[in-house]
Image (cartoon, rainbow, N blue to C red):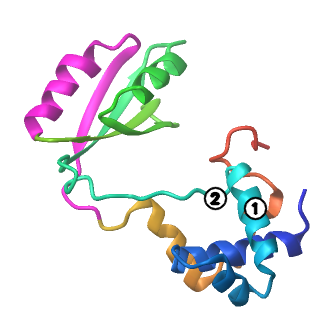
Amino acid sequence: MASKSSIEKDRSIIRELVQEPRQTNVALAAKVGLSEGSVRRRMERLVADGQLQFAAIPSASFMGRPVHTLFEIQSSPGSTEQLIDNLAGMPEIAYVYHVTGQFDVIAVGYFASSNAMRQFWTERLGHLDGVMESRSVMVLRVAKRAHEWARDIAVTGDDEESAWDTGTDPGVPGSEV
């Protein structure tokens, strides 16, 4: 496991990248007090370890999919993993979560129209093996996107103990406690 000092250096790099993702390694190194080579190696390791990802995130509506819908799905006993795999393979579905509570799976989809969403829900999702019950919830407005949480942390810092402090990340396979 990495030392607390090493983790804090990695976090400082990530905080700077969240604030300005297009900066050069040289500029980033100057801000965090490390050499350019050290920053480059740390970023390569963070990417390889699944702790850092780089992505262009377009607006779904700009890309022709303005109807944002959450599907709450209760699976039949023993079918949850296969259902998750099937949902993850569908191009309309952007996120699939295995969750606790009344439903076993939450899937998030983006559609060209409410009619396209209805067809998906009734003709495709409703016929998947393992679906016992499903509900759809259409999103009216997104007040904050998932990736934007990191901007808050980059600005305010994160003084509380986190998964990084314990060497685990519930979002990365194989890092469970």
The image shows residue 62 at horizontal and vertical percentages of 20, 57
Stretch of the chain drawn in magenta: 114-142
Q: In the rendered image, which quarter is residue 54 located in?
A: bottom right
Find numbered disc 1 in the image and state the secondary structure of the residue it sits on.
helix
In this rendering, is residue 60 above or below 39? above
The image shows residue 93 at horizontal and vertical percentages of 34, 35
> How many discs appear?
2
The image shows residue 91 at horizontal and vertical percentages of 33, 32
Whether residue 35 is visible here, answered yes or no, is yes
Q: In the image, 45: left or right of 139?
A: right
Whether residue 163 is visible here, answered yes or no, is no
Mark 1 or 2: in front is: 2
> Foreground: 29 or 17?
29
Which disc number belongs to residue 52? Answer: 2
Q: In the rendered image, which quarter is residue 83 located in?
A: top left
Residue type pointed to by label 1: Trp
> Foreground: 98 or 39?
39
| Residue bearing mark 1 | 164
Q: Residue at x 71, y 64 (%)?
A: 43
Disc 2 crowd rating (10 Å Cα; few below 14, some 14-19, many 20+) is: few
